[in-house]
């Protein structure tokens, strides 16, 4: 059985491959038109492709089954030497059939080869014109509406190569990039260009006079043998009078500001460990064209409270082989930086690119190197504004020491009564310290007096009330004013947040101590200590200098009384909008309304449209809008809708301005109000 199956496979497989080679071109013809129609309309082209692929798969399966079933008959008709006995190759039924099969197998290599297989496939298969014809008709139906609805694109695609060659022979474009970019000038034929900002673009006429029309409304007449120049500040589309149907784009690449990075230290605030001898500072600056100047600014802060001194220092970063980069790093010793325990060093990098007319200056964020000083005896006493400290008030560090000592003593033989007494004593100290810090958030406290708000209980026991009249202050007579949290303090929100964190931790520690669980009280006690230390370290704040620097006084005009050119300090009451901008918006609205029909457009409509298009945000939007302006100017009525849509994007609602109106207050008005 296995031998018979091998024989069938050895004969049927070559026949199927020959049929496959004959049918593959028709399958490709049924799917290729759909692939060509994809750029025109993707959903319709995909549907057409699915139909073509489905028919190809069905046809392949049909011929596979047919070749597997009919190959003996095909062999008998194509090879007479097999004596109409090809069916015996598949399944011989008798000894005589097996004998004939062995004779055929011996004769088979001589009478059956690739040419016979191809002849069988050529004879048995037939052409399938109708799927290819339907696919081509469907692709044409997809392309035709797209071509009709895109006149501008059809115009570009229909432009023959002869027109482009004529324009190339008549006009040459010369581009001169700015000198600071390091790019070389070049000449080119008319084509789409991408140039650096502020490049000089020149059109030179070779044969005859040529007029260059820019998308922003500029018209450059170029005489034969002469050139006209234009400065590239924004993207623009242009065309020439030689071939008005050919339009090209000039895109502008603006100069990018430098990029400044600080590689080391990584954190914005770097705490130096005690005993640190050196610190690494690594900075880098890069630009797309070149770095003209890069400096490292160092500011050393020393002192505390109101006695803080700042020392500034500036050093240039060395220039390397690559003018577009400045990479610099150095391991500074603390002596070179001038740092001592308790000092802080602030540094940042400032870089300026090499654009001489429009330089970009970028400054990195400020990084801080902090060298902690020796800890004071009472860390909590200097964290906030000073106040009289009672003798029995213990610091947070002392509370932590007492708690750790109690935990150590509990491991021995300490009586339960002694444990309770010492834990409650530490809890009382924690409560007193919590109430002291709570005063800075507006909380009331009895720490510095023995009164227990006895006056609160006497609000309803007033001995005598004076008669009330229209001038009676009810809040002062019957009310009781308390300081409100977050209102009666002098601290910023960040300091208040740290204070709340410290008070919350103290309260958790106090609850644990009163529950006679000192081990549970240690973590919140350390949290409270950390918050207090954070308040201490936030005592010094560094800000860049941003003060107003007035111009120098001219001695020749001083004390002369000449006020020419002096501006008034009075606030001018106006409508809040620019009259020219309001008038331009009104003209754009009138033009957009006119574009909705087929009537004549207003006078100077191209100037109005050009000014509006220049306010579009992106280069692609500006170029498309400029092409729409040129199409409408050429008389394209269907293009009016596209230009109207671009103009509507430039309109914005007028801002709402709330402004006080001046009013004269005369003596007559005051007298009139008094008599009413």
Image (cartoon, helix red, strand yellow):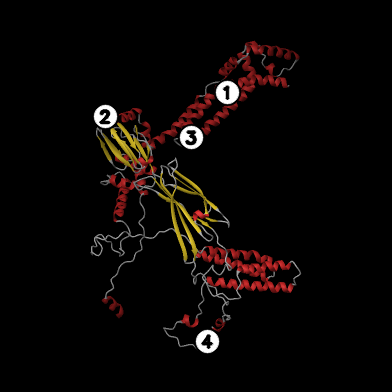
Mark 2 and 4 residues: CB-CB less than 8 Å, in contact?
Answer: no
Q: Is residue 636 above or below residue 313?
A: above
- Closer to the observer: label 3 or label 2? 2
Circle 4: element type: loop
**Residue positioned most to the bottom:** 464
Report the residue marked by disc 1: 20
What is the x, y in percent for residue 251? 37, 40
The residue depicted at 49 percent of the width and 29 percent of the height is: 32
272 and 189: which is toward the camera: 272
What is the x, y in percent for residue 103? 70, 11
Mark 4 or 3, nearer chain start = 3
Report the residue marked by disc 4: 462
The answer to whether residue 42 is visible is: yes
Crowd rating for badge 2 (residues with CA inside 10 Å; few <14, some 14–19, many 20+): few
Report the residue marked by disc 3: 45
Mark 2 or 4, nearer chain start = 2
The residue depicted at 45 percent of the width and 30 percent of the height is: 137
Q: CA distance from mark 2 to mark 4?
A: 110 Å
- Closer to the observer: label 4 or label 3? 4
Quarter of the figure with residue 319: top left
Report the residue marked by disc 2: 207
Q: Looking at the rendering, in which quadrant would you find the C terminus?
A: bottom left
What is the x, y in percent for residue 621? 38, 44
**Residue positioned most to the front:** 335
Q: CA distance from mark 3 to mark 2?
A: 46 Å
Mark 1 and 2 residues: CB-CB less than 8 Å, in contact?
Answer: no
Q: CA distance from mark 4 to mark 3?
A: 93 Å
Q: Residue 606: which disc? A: none
Mark 4 and 1 residues: CB-CB less than 8 Å, in contact?
Answer: no
Mark 1 or 2, nearer chain start = 1
């Amino acid at each position: 059985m296995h031998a018979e199956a091998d024989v069938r496979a050895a004969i049927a497989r070559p026949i199927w491959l020959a049929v496959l080679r004959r049918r593959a071109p028709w399958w490709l013809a049924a799917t290729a038109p759909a692939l060509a129609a994809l750029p025109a309309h993707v959903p319709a082209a995909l549907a057409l492709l699915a139909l073509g692929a489905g028919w190809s798969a069905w046809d392949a399966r049909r011929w596979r089954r047919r070749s597997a079933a009919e190959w003996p008959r095909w062999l008998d008709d194509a090879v007479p030497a097999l004596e109409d006995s090809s069916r015996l190759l598949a399944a011989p039924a008798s000894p005589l059939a097996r004998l004939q099969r062995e004779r055929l197998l011996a004769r088979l290599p001589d009478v059956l080869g690739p040419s016979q297989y191809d002849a069988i496939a050529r004879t048995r298969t037939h052409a399938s014109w109708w799927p290819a014809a339907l696919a081509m008709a469907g692709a044409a139906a997809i392309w035709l509406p797209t071509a009709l609805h895109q006149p501008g694109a059809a115009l570009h695609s229909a432009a023959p190569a002869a027109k482009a060659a004529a324009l190339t022979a008549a006009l040459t474009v010369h581009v001169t990039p700015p000198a600071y970019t390091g790019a070389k000038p070049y000449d080119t034929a008319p084509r789409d260009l991408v140039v650096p900002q502020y490049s000089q673009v020149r059109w030179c006429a070779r044969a005859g006079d040529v007029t260059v029309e820019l998308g922003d409304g500029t018209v450059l007449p170029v005489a034969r043998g002469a050139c006209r120049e234009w400065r590239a500040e924004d993207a623009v589309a242009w065309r020439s009078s030689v071939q008005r149907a050919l339009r090209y784009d000039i895109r502008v690449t603006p100069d990018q500001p430098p990029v400044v990075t600080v590689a080391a230290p990584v954190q914005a605030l770097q705490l130096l460990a005690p005993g640190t001898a050196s610190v690494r500072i690594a900075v880098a600056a890069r630009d797309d064209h070149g770095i003209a100047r890069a400096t490292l600014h160092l500011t050393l802060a020393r002192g505390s409270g109101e006695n803080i001194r700042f020392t500034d220092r500036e050093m240039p970063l060395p220039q390397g082989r690559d003018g577009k980069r400045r990479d610099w790093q150095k391991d500074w010793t603390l002596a070179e930086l001038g740092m001592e325990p308790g000092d802080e060093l602030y540094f940042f990098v400032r870089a300026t690119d090499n654009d001489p007319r429009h330089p970009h200056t970028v400054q990195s964020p400020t990084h801080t190197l902090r060298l902690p000083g020796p800890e004071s005896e009472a860390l909590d006493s200097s964290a906030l504004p000073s106040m009289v400290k009672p003798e029995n008030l213990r610091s947070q560090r002392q509370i932590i020491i007492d708690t750790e000592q109690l935990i150590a003593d509990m491991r021995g033989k300490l009586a339960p009564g002694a444990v309770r007494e010492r834990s409650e004593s530490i809890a009382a100290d924690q409560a007193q310290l919590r109430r002291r810090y709570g005063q800075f958030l507006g909380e009331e406290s009895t720490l510095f007096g023995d009164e227990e708000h006895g006056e609160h209980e006497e609000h309803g026991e007033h001995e005598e009330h004076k008669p009330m009249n229209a001038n009676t202050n009810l809040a002062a007579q019957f009310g009781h004013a308390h300081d409100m949290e977050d209102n009666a303090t002098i601290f910023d929100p960040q300091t208040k947040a740290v204070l709340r964190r410290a008070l919350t931790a103290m309260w958790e520690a106090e609850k644990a101590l009163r529950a006679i669980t000192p081990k549970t009280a240690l973590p919140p006690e350390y949290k409270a200590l950390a918050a207090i230390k954070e308040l201490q370290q936030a005592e010094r704040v560094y800000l860049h200098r941003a003060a107003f620097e007035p111009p120098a006084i001219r001695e020749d005009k001083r004390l002369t009384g000449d006020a020419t050119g002096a501006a008034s300090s009075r606030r001018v009451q106006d409508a809040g909008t620019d009259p020219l901008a309001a008038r331009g918006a009104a003209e754009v609205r009138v033009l957009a309304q006119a574009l909705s029909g087929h009537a004549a457009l207003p006078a100077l409509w191209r100037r109005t449209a050009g000014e509006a298009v220049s306010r579009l945000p992106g280069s692609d939007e500006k170029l498309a809008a400029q092409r729409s302006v040129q199409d409408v100017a050429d008389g394209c009525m269907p293009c009016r809708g596209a230009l109207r849509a671009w103009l509507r994007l430039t309109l914005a609602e007028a801002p709402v301005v709330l402004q006080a109106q001046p009013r004269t207050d005369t003596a007559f008005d005051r007298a009139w109000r008094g008599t009413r």
